[in-house]
């Protein structure tokens, strides 16, 4: 079954990229390029899903739903 996940991407101070998947707690990866990040985050998602499936056998895991990203300015 295909599932779609959202990746929040940030650029670090060294110019590399860090991605985080808000729907999967603790699921993140990095890469020197966006292509490398997307390859790495896909692998991380697959691993997180494997761990989640193993954990569901022993307990209920609370799932979250990605809503969006908002910008806010404070003075």
Image: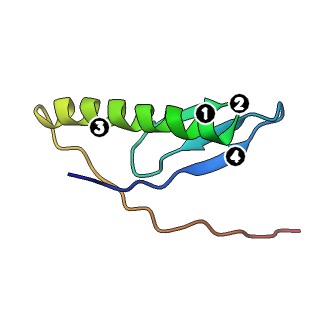
Q: Secondary structure at mark 2?
A: loop
Give the residue pinned by disc 3.
Answer: 49
Give the residue pinned by disc 2.
Answer: 32
Give the residue pinned by disc 4.
Answer: 10
Q: Quadrant of residue 72?
A: bottom right
Q: Who comes first in sequence, dot 1 or dot 4? A: 4
64 lies left or right of 62: right
How far apart are the two marked residues, 3 and 1, measured between alpha carbons? Answer: 20 Å
Q: Residue farthest to the front?
A: 35
Q: Tell me whether the residue at label 1 lies in contact with that at label 2, contact meaning CB atoms closer than 8 angstroms.
A: yes
Crowding at label 2, few (<14), some or many (≥20) Cα neighbours within 10 Å? some
Residue 36, numbered circle: 1
Q: Who comes first in sequence, dot 3 or dot 1? A: 1
The x and y percentages for residue 1 are 20, 51
How far apart are the two marked residues, 2 and 4, measured between alpha carbons? Answer: 12 Å
Q: Residue at x 41, y 42 (%)?
A: 25
Crowding at label 4, few (<14), some or many (≥20) Cα neighbours within 10 Å? few
In this orientation, which residue lies closer to the viewer: 64 or 37?
37
How far apart are the two marked residues, 1 and 2, measured between alpha carbons? Answer: 6 Å
In this orientation, which residue lies closer to the viewer: 75 or 26?
26
Crowding at label 3, few (<14), some or many (≥20) Cα neighbours within 10 Å? some
How far apart are the two marked residues, 3 and 4, measured between alpha carbons? Answer: 23 Å
Q: Secondary structure at mark 3?
A: helix
């Amino acid at each position: 079954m295909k599932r779609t996940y959202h990746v929040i991407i940030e650029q670090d101070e060294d110019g590399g990229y860090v991605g985080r998947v808000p729907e999967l707690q603790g699921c993140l990866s990095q890469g020197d390029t966006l292509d490398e990040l997307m390859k790495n985050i896909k692998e991380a998602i697959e691993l997180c899903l494997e761990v989640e499936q193993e954990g569901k056998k022993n307990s209920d895991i609370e799932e979250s739903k990605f809503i969006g990203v908002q910008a806010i300015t404070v003075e």
